[in-house]
Amino acid sequence: MARMPRRQGAPSPFLVRTSGTLTADNETLVVPFGDNETPGHWLLKLMAARMLALDGYPVSRLAAERPITVGDTDLRADLIGEGTTPQVWIECLNCQRGKLKKIAQHFRGRVIHVDTFWWGQPQEIADLADYALRWFHPSHLSQSQQGPALKEDDEPFSRGIFDPVGGIEHWHCDLRSPPSWGVRAADEGELFFLEEDELGIRPLPIWKFLWVKHMRESGRKPYEIEELSPEDPFVPSPRFLLKYWGHRWDGLLSSAAMQVIQQHGRDPGQETDLCYIIELLLSWGFPSQAISIRKRTLLGSRQFVPYVLAETQGRRIWIERTLDTEKLNYVGRRFRGKVLVLDEMDRTGLRLWLSGAAEDDSELSLPVGTEHWHTYGGILTGWGVSRTTGKSIRIFHTQETKSVPWTAADLFFSRYGLSNFRPRVMSFGTGRLSGMVT
């Protein structure tokens, strides 16, 4: 049987049109599902409408997908409150930064951005920090990231960048219930956290991380950042730093290094990490006879076995390859010299500190008086962390290493440097701002 032609302009017989209906206080709002709309975007509009209803807005005054001229640009609002006090404009899921900035600049009222942000769960932040560590290479070294990165206005807000638009409420929604918490940046850059009146538990691990990241990217660094001078006696030369897309150094051993290795009964073919450290110490001016491997050493009233120890007139250095917090706390406070810890990402150190995001991490596990250099494949990447006294944390890097994995550094500091964090919180309820609490 021949198929009957469809009339020009007639709707497809397979097109199913649907809509969501929200009823509150005997008022009804119909939110249609658009032809080119994703289910996630449509569901977020329903969640946002429900959020406003719970906040006291009459749903009959909300309109969906309303075209509006903002400044000299024609925009479409996902939801807009017409005749509400205050006026409210809602944007959902993957809204472009440029559109949000335009709305914030010209719209007089409350602007709400609802999305499933990447920073919606603690583990997502930890995974992103781990990714930043894993894929950090000197190929990034020419791009300094100490200031705010340039961002394209046509990119969706939620794709991996935390860039709160001033004056806009960015509410996180997990698609299962109305948004319950969010973030708002004041025009002067101050960061506030948002919550519904009945929020049970504040997501403090996430709030800490966002505050630290926002402070650093706005030029108000919450931790000390130091670029090491090449004249420093314990700064590695470029020869010992991770090369572009390579995890090996040149591997060339001097006769002095071979002498140290052989004197201690080691096989240079089996212990490349040890050979690397010995050659590094020789480059810092330690003679071969001043270097010992796994030598039992008395320190205070206790004895320890350092991985490598080097001592010459006026200079001493103690090197460890594993994170033993109790041992390092003792050594770091009593050893008269440099205590260096080379943290391999895949085994100990930074990855251990960055895994997960527990809320009750009150004790800083970074030992006082130790300097932790991050390594990859046993090779120094050129950056690390240290803690001097109390909660003071320092991020350091060589001149060749113009940037570090800042996401990892932000998470590290937010977990272990903000035990007394008191967020500025705005609670919303009954259709108005109900005040600031701490």
Image (cartoon, rainbow, N blue to C red):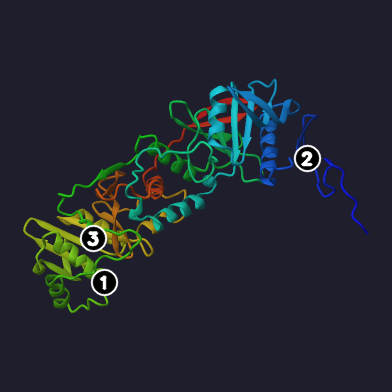
Residue 362: percent from the left, percent from the top?
A: 40, 48
Q: Classify the position of the N terminus by image quarter.
A: bottom right
Asked which secondary structure carries label 1, the reply is: helix
Q: Is 32 or 319 nearer to us in this picture?
A: 32
Q: Residue lying furthest left in this view?
A: 313
| Residue under pointer 2 | 19
Label 1: how many Cα within 10 Å (few below 14, some 14–19, many 20+): some
Instruction: Give the residue at x 33% y 63%.
Output: 246
The answer to the question of whether label 1 and label 3 lie on touching residues, with beta carbons closer than 8 A, is no
Instruction: Give the residue at x 39% y 58%.
Output: 351
Residue 284: percent from the left, percent from the top?
A: 14, 59
Kindly indicate the quadrant of the structure image that contains residue 80.
top right
The answer to the question of whether label 3 and label 2 lie on touching residues, with beta carbons closer than 8 A, is no
State which tag comes first along the sequence, 3 or 2. 2
Asked which secondary structure carries label 2, the reply is: strand
Instruction: Give the residue at x 70% y 23%.
Output: 82
Q: Is 372 or 218 nearer to us in this picture?
A: 218
| Residue under pointer 3 | 240
Residue 385: percent from the left, percent from the top?
A: 30, 51
| Residue under pointer 1 | 272
Give the distance between the C-alpha atoms of the residues marked 2 and 1, in whole angstroms.
Answer: 65 Å
Three-letter amino acid code of the residue under disc 2: Ser
In the image, residue 328 sits, relative to residue 84, either above or below, namely below
The answer to the question of whether label 2 and label 1 lie on touching residues, with beta carbons closer than 8 A, is no
Q: Which mark is residue 341?
A: none
Three-letter amino acid code of the residue under disc 3: Phe
